Image (cartoon, rainbow, N blue to C red):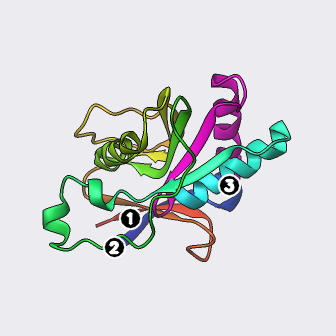
């Protein structure tokens, strides 16, 4: 893999997450019925950061959770005959709430579809919205993000790599040529 470009550094990522937080507050007229749900793996720390920014802005905590989509993937049989779910799904009650799914990259839409299915399995939210750091296109399902940090048109021979402190050594988004 060859590094093609650095899309976001740590400061640009922080500015992007701050903008997404403001957009979430504005679109939902506050945070009263909101539950932010990070999609494992990198969606979880991104959701945590957005929640922290919202708390700074609004002065109160937003409800926060995470979802493991392993059992809801449509390619489960090709991934493993015995999938292992490392942590159970943990998030607030979603009934009649505005659930905002948070992920690092929106690509085909399949991860989001699995997350929606996992959420619906837990209850019927008032609404489900989607926040992503990067939208790279190439959708295979009719899914669109409500909040996008950056649109990055890519070819299928390119890879978007999101690095998040807490999992990785730094905050950055890079594009690689395969």
Question: Mark 3 or mark 1, which has the lower sequence index?
Answer: 3
Q: Are marks 3 and 1 in contact (CB under 8 Å)?
A: no
Q: Could you tell me how far apart the alpha carbons at marks 2 and 3 are, in whole angstroms?
A: 29 Å
Q: Nearer the viewer, mark 3 or mark 1?
A: 3
Position in image of residue 119 (x %, y %): 41, 43
Residue visible at 34% across and 47% down in the picture: 107
Q: Which residue is mark 2?
A: 1
Instruction: Say which element carries label 3.
Output: helix
Earlier in the chain: of badge 2 and badge 1, it is: 2
Q: Is residue 36 magenta?
A: yes
Q: Which mark is residue 49?
A: 3
Which quarter shows the C terminus? bottom left
Mark 2 Cα-neighbour bin, 10 Å: few <14, some 14–19, many ≥20: few
Determine if the magenta segment contains residue 113: no
Left or right: residue 133 compared with residue 27: left
- In the rendered image, residue 8, in percent from the top left (x then y), is placed at 58, 56
Q: Which residues are magenta?
A: 14-43
Which label belongs to residue 99? none
Drawn side of residue 157 relative to residue 13, left or right? left
* Of marks 2 and 3, the one in the foreground: 3
Distance between mark 2 and mark 1 Cα atoms: 6 Å
């Amino acid at each position: 893999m060859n590094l093609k470009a650095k899309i976001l550094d740590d400061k640009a990522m922080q500015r992007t997450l701050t903008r997404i937080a403001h957009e979430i507050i504005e679109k939902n007229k506050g945070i009263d019925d909101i539950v932010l749900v990070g999609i494992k793996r990198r969606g979880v720390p991104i959701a945590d950061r957005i929640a922290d920014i919202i708390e700074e802005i609004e002065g109160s905590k937003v409800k926060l959770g995470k979802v493991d989509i392993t059992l809801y993937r449509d390619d489960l049989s090709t991934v493993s005959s015995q999938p292992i779910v490392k942590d159970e799904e943990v998030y607030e009650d979603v009934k009649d709430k505005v659930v905002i799914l948070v992920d690092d990259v929106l690509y085909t839409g399949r991860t989001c579809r699995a997350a929606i299915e996992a959420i619906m399995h837990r209850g019927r939210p008032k609404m489900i919205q989607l926040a992503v750091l990067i939208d790279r296109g190439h959708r295979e399902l009719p899914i669109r993000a409500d909040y996008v940090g950056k649109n990055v048109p890519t070819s299928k021979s390119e890879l978007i790599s999101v690095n998040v402190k807490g999992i990785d050594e730094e905050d950055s988004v890079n594009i690689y040529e395969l």
